[in-house]
Image (spheres, grey):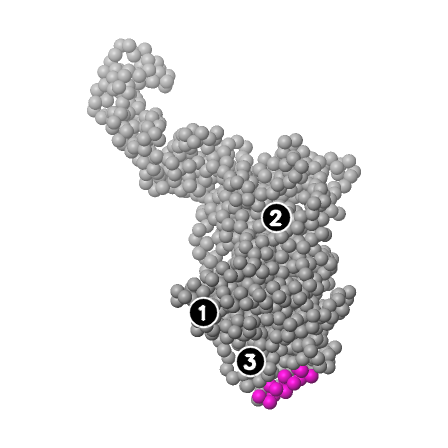
Amino acid sequence: MSTPPSDWEVVIGLEVHVQLHTRAKVFASSPWGFGKEPNEQVDPVVLGLPGTLPVVNREAVEKSILFGLVVGASVPEHCSWDRKNYFYPDNPKNYQLTQKDFPVVVGGQVEIELPGASRNVMGEHKFIRIHHAHLEEDVGKLSHAGSGSLVDYNRAGVPLLEIVTEPDLRSSAEAEAFLRSLVAMLTQAGVADCDMEKGQLRCDCNVSIRRRGVEKLGTRTETKNLNSISSVRDTVIYETARQVRELEAGRSITQETRGWNAELGRGYVLRDKEDAHDYRYFPDPDIPTLKISRETVARLGKLVPENLYDRQRRYVDKLGLPYTAASVLVNARALAEWFELAVAAHPTNPSGIANLVANDLLRDLAASAGNAGPLADSAAAPVSLSSCLIKPAQLAGLVKLTDDGVISKQQAKEVFTEMFKSGQDAAAIVDAKGLRQNSDTGELEKIVQEVIADPAVAKSIAEYRAGNEKAINALKGPIMKRTQGKANPVLIDQLLRKFLA
Amino acid sequence: MADALHTLSAAELGRRLAAGTLTSRALCEALITRYKALNETVGAFTHLDQADVLAQADASDARRKAGQGRGPLEGIPVAIKDNIAVKGQPLTCSSKMLASLVSPYDSHVAERLCAVGAILYGRLNMDEFAMGSSTENSALRKTFNPWDLARIPGGSSGGSAAALAAGLVPLSLGSDTGGSIRQPASHCGVVGLKPTYGLISRFGLVAFASSLDQIGPMARSIEDCELLLNALASADARDMTCFGPSDRALTPSGDAKKLRIGIPKGFLGKGVAAEVAAAVNAAVEFYRAQGCAISEVELPSADLAVPTYYVVATAEASSNLGRYDGVRYGHRSTSAGTPVEMMTASRSEGFGPEVKRRILLGTFVLSAGYADAYYVRALRARAKIRSEYLAALAGVDVLLTPTVPTPAFKVGEKASDPLQLYLEDIFTIPANLAGLPALSVPCGKSGHLPVGFHLVGAPLSEAKLLAAGRLFEAAHGFAHQQAAL
């Protein structure tokens, strides 16, 4: 259950930490990536060796600005970095470079879509405001082995954009919808890959509850380091229930930092307010205030892709797509753009194209990639269209053949399967297989009349004429048999009705 | 005459090397001989890899022979303060914490020195992490003033100044956060320049207070100091606060006799020893006689400089020194329990008392509830001091004061009184707070102890400061002076 008991309202704010898609680390030239040996991706700067200095990675700043533009934030004229001081072995300098006072992104909003009543029905849309987003450095990883501890600094210095929402979310479903929408926007703009399996997206979740109608916010707790969307959902449900239980028992909520045990499905206290760190923030003297030129902002503005839901609305309203297909197509930018290329090649039947792309193409791609479900996690593994043998114009060609009555819809499926395997044009497959429909009216009229004259079908004809519509189908089998299944079924139906009228 | 090589200037050595009458190997061998004879007495060096030095010298001689000499510093030894990274050499900062550290990388200035063919000659003692004014805070050894071995050489670049005054090396690098180049230069009778903040890359300089630290050249003459400065200043993308070489700073300026010299009001009254005041006043009169316009200038917030400095510098230091925790390098306590306990014990064991005092002070001034009263206020005071200095320097070319109020004191004399010691830097600190270039020039003696005067200029006015220094130097006998040892 995702909604709190009716007289309590839950208020949620998220802090989403996203590793940016960059070649180098945020303040060092060392590259980074997943699956390397421990401490392989370090250099003197990453390790905080004495005398080393940070240099801001332009690519990381530009990806951050691009995110700001994607969510409609204002891009400030300047941003700067501060030191957050705390001691822990995974933190090579024992301070983290972050942006406290002048972040790179201020404001903005993310449109979300809540689940509809069914898969085929669009749910409610809502806007979640972004308070700000700041660019900071990730820390290493400490692990305990036997009697000692081991630390791996490969992750240290990876660019991390921390996206902080206003407390606008009101349910676990909204939190989940927000994260899905955010992931789609980040991946579609190329800002981040958001692969949660690799820890590329981590979340801190602030939860408080209040009586419905009360404006004052309740005391909140912060659950740290949630590494999947489902953990966020489960945390909200758990924490809401816990807070309701506490307050209804006459106790109060303690402002505290909590952790989440995903295996047990339980939260736990990490530290309370008294133990809160004093981070002794101050402006980093090694990094001068960075000026963000309007030319840079204008250049990056050209890289902003069409908003996910603007695209969805366009598909439904302008292209006439069913909501279900539209919602599938817009999840991955590459897929949507693939679809649009096909539509450009055959503009008269977008729905026919959408149907093939959203169902047949995704199904076969997923099957060939061994994926459980297409677009189950568009962030981690966007269905690879690069390996797809069918090109958009070829798919458009297939739909056109169907629309022109050259082949039937049933035959189209068969042709599609062949195209997927070989990458050949639809027309070539149709010809090679001799699938071209017989739409020769003169020839078909003759065959129809011969079948009608066959005494074997007299009973069906009588039933049809007596008003049983379905009885007409009994005549179609023999016609197909005489044409080796190539007769245009639409034409046959027309001819039968004409001669039996 | 090989036995007199240690008395020669870098410029003269360069001329002999260029003329082929001297080899870098012969020069380095002579200096190594002197090092062996004197370093135990003076204590300037903490490390000298003789084989490495001779290998560098041979390489330099070979380059020169092949017609591939790299300029006026080709083959000339430059000794380096032990907080500036040289690949493969110790980088101890004279601290127990880093006593075993060998740098795996080169600082920008080390790269520059290699690029101009200089010999990277040994590591110089200093106050631990550059915190101090006497070099007594070194955890590795004591350094003594060559002019009086019972006295301190100044600090924190005490090794850099003492090595020059003892004739152990013709050129050295120091670093200056509140006077750490200029104060020991004054006490040891040598020339020391703290450049404009940002002129020389800090990449590879172990940070004490990042917004104040600058590497600078030290030498026995203005000419040598300028030679070294020109080699060090170059653009470096690894330090975002470095703006690279500046023609304005490095191009010799016009007639030094036309300089307008400002004397800050009241500076000569503040606990300045009579003989120091007399030597500095004589320098002022010299400039007046040369035709310079002398005027008095007001710097009303000057009294705020020392307290402001000790808030800003310690705040930054408390954060900069956080990385020394025994996890990745440096001293690691063996009484370790959990990782965090190990870090705490390593820091308790690895740092000396002055470093701990400053970390504690810096941690306090940044802590919640106190930062506004201390750190934020200090930043405001710093801005005020800077604007007053810039305003004063709009009307004059340079400001002239003593470098240090009193001559070098006796070893141990002020060790128990840190506040008294902090006043050593009263005249030098404002240049760091304001990011301005400043030069200490030898100008006389108080008894047998050297005295220097201090010039501060507008940003990138290094050439003017050096021109003023050269004018004075040319008319007096203090250039190339060395203590008799």
Q: Nearer the viewer, residue A266 or A282?
A: A282
Drawn side of residue A349 relative to residue B88, left or right: left
* Subunit of label 3: B
Residue A484 located within the stretch drawn in magenta: no
Q: Nearer the viewer, mark 3 or mark 2?
A: 3
Quadrant (top left, top right, bottom left, bottom right) of the N terminus of chain A:
top right
* Subunit of label 2: B
Image location of residue B299, percent across then percent down: 67, 77
Check disc 2 and report its element: helix, strand or loop. loop
Label number found at residue A339: none
Q: Earlier in the sequence, mark 3 or mark 1?
A: 1
Q: Mark 3: few, some, or many residues within 10 Å (few <14, many ≥20)?
A: some
In this view, which residue lies farthest toward the right? A250
What amino acid is labelled 3 in the image? Arg
What amino acid is labelled 2 in the image? Arg
Secondary structure mostly taken by the magenta-highlighted segment of the chain: helix
Q: Residue at x 55, y 76 (%)?
A: B222
Q: Which residue is mark 1?
A: B71
> Does residue A499 show up?
yes
Q: Which residue is mark 2?
A: B328
Q: Which residue is mark 3?
A: B470
